[in-house]
Structure formats: structure tokens, C-alpha cells
Image (cartoon, helix red, strand yellow):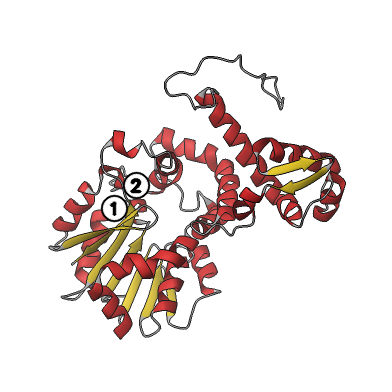
Amino acid sequence: MRHGGSRLSRPTPVATVAGMPDSGTPRFFADLISWYALEALAFGDALGLRSALLQGPGTSAEIALRADADPRTTATWLAAMVAAGYAKHDTGVFRVDPDQVAFLDGSFPAVDTLALLDFVRAMGARVPAVLDVLRSGSAPDHDLFGAEFGEAVGRVNAPLYAGALVTDWLAADDEVTARLEAGTTVVDLGCGSGAATRVMAEAFPTSTFIGVDRDAAALDRARRTAPGNVSFATAPPASYQVVTILDSFHHFADPDAVLAQIRAALPPGGVMVIAESSYEGDIDVDTADPFSVIGLASALLYCDVEARSPSGTNQIAPQDGGVALRRALAAAGFSTITTHEGTGGYRVYFAR
């Protein structure tokens, strides 16, 4: 590639080999194409071009006017979207590919795709700082990832929580559901911007929910849309009856200490609910799922970095199939552990 250039020479066609996509494009270049496509989509989102294209068919000049964007930038972006398969072109008029509308307008039900675009932009800006942490072995600064990144992460799984947290994950344990319906005190630990906390609070209005997170900026965002039975704090109260830790346990730098504190705070009969990505603990089985790339790369770039501590991480990650988590739960005094394979690729643990 030329220095500062925007085009790679097309690789010489080669025969399809093992590990190569069916299209015959070498894996490296297929991944590179996908990276450029997503970066370009995120770039256009920030410039207002995604929204302008969604308003309806239009010429490049019309879409530039809608977005108040530079005409040349708009023309280049639209061509990139056609090449990536997000848009179609016919005699000077551009329109969204109908099959891609749900991804571009945020209506896809399983995940907030627009939050993922924000995640892509925010993560790219933080790669140098992440590399410094990984090279030095030091603990990251508390604000390494920043408010913009935290806001995007907080939105990514919101559709999943809205669709599955109450009706599938929590519903798998009749006793937990009965407690929540009757009214109890729940701590949502590692709540971030409070998406899951709000879902639970709205579903169980007789219960009291306390979202806990060390990120004060995230808690400020959470308070803006919190129901009346929710409060937020940077530390949990002295006691509570139920605690949820949803897709955040693997971020804790000292999970054994966290579990010991929870065990001490829960009364007899109290329950902890943990949701973590559902791995089998067999690398060949787990990596056969193409979506595993997202989870593993996220762990590399973000989750494992946050979990580092000055003395070296004691993180309990889900990739071992839950072996370390079960061992830690037992060591902390949780004698009964049941699991549920939940919607969205998550394993839900109920520990008593």
C-alpha cells in the first residue's frame, strides 16, 4: 500500500484452499474487506450520512444536502456502501439494500447495531493505550476507555436484555421470579448504564433495585431514565436478598474478593444470578462458531484489559466453560449452583 493511500492492489486470484472462504478470497483479505466496510459505515454514521441515506432514495448530491456533508466525501462513502453491500445504485440514485435496513436503522432485535458502530469508533481511538497496558503488564487507568466507549457498551446488549432477561434468563428459576414478583431488594452489580437494571425494575415494580458500578459517568446516564424503584451507587449496601451480575463478572480484577463480599451480604436463602458467555471449554468446539471471533477479540481488546490488577489479573473468564467460576463459587461458600443455557448465547448461573 502506498503511504497514505486508500487502495490495495487486488491480490492475484488463487485456488481455494482449506481455511479460505467459499468465495475464493483469501481469509486475510476477506477480513480486511469486512474491516474497511464496518469502519466506513461507522464513519458515515458519525457524519450523518447513514441517517440521510435511510431517509429514502437519492442522488449523491441530494444525500450530501440531507446530511450537510461534503459532496466528495458523500460520493465516496456511497460508493463504499454499494461495494460493501449496504446500499444499491441505479442510474445515479442510491438506496439502502432492503436486507440491510434493520442493521442500519437500529431495529435489529438481538443487539443494538448503532451502538456497535459507536463501539468501533471508540475502540479504535483507544488501541494505543490498550497496547501500552498489555506491553507493560500494568493495571489500566480507571478511565482508560472513557465515557464514549462506556456509553456504547451500555447500549449494545440492551435489546437482548429487553427480550430475554426477564422472560428467559430469570424465568428459568421459579424461586427467583417469585421473590421478584413478591418484592425484594436486588443489587445489579456491574450495571454500567443500567440497561438491565431498568428492564428488571419495570418488570418487577414491587421490588427495589440498586445498580452498582464504579463508573460514575455511567451511573449519571443511568439515572436519567431510571424508574422510581431504582437507585444507583458506586458501592453496594450492607445487605440485600438477590444480586445479579450480568455479562460483567469477567471484568472483575479480584473476583474471589467480590464473591466473598456477596456471600457475607446475602442472608440465608439469598441468591446470586450470574450471566456469562456460554463457552464449552473446548477450543475446537467454541471456535467453530464464527461469532466466537467477536467474543474472543473483545476479551483481548477490552474485557481482559479492564480486569487487570496491579498484582496481575485473577480474572475468571468464561472461555473455560465455567470451570473456574464454579470452583470460585464453591470456595466462597455457595453450595448449590444450577445453570440455564439462555437466549443470546449466555449461560445463567443461580448460586445459593
Q: Position of residue 251 (x, y in %)?
A: 37, 52
Q: Position of residue 166 (x, y in %)?
A: 37, 70
**Location of mark 2 (residue):** 309
Whichever of labels 2 and 1 marks the residue nearer the N terminus, that label is: 1
Say left or right for 125 vs 139. Answer: right
Q: Is residue 172 above or below residue 330?
A: below
Q: Residue drawn at (69%, 50%), measured in percent from left and top?
A: 46
Q: Do the residues labelled 2 and 1 touch (CB within 8 Å)?
A: yes
Q: In which quarter of the image is residue 213?
A: bottom left
Q: What residue type is labelled 2?
A: Ser
Q: Quadrant of residue 341?
A: bottom left
Whether residue 68 is visible to the viewer of this picture, yes or no, is yes
In the rendered view of the protein, which quadrant contains the N terminus? top right
**Location of mark 1 (residue):** 254
Disc 1 residue crowd, few under 14, some 14–19, many 20+, Cα 10 Å: some
Q: In this view, does 89 lie above or below 155?
A: above
Q: Position of residue 37 (x, y in %)?
A: 63, 38
Disc 2 residue crowd, few under 14, some 14–19, many 20+, Cα 10 Å: some
Q: What element carries label 1?
A: loop
Q: Residue drawn at (52%, 25%), measured in percent from left and top?
A: 28
Q: Residue drawn at (37%, 81%), measured in percent from left and top?
A: 208
Q: What element carries label 2?
A: loop
Q: Where is residue 40 in the image (x, y as percent from the top left)?
A: 67, 40
Query: For this rendering, which residue is in front, 226 or 125?
Result: 226
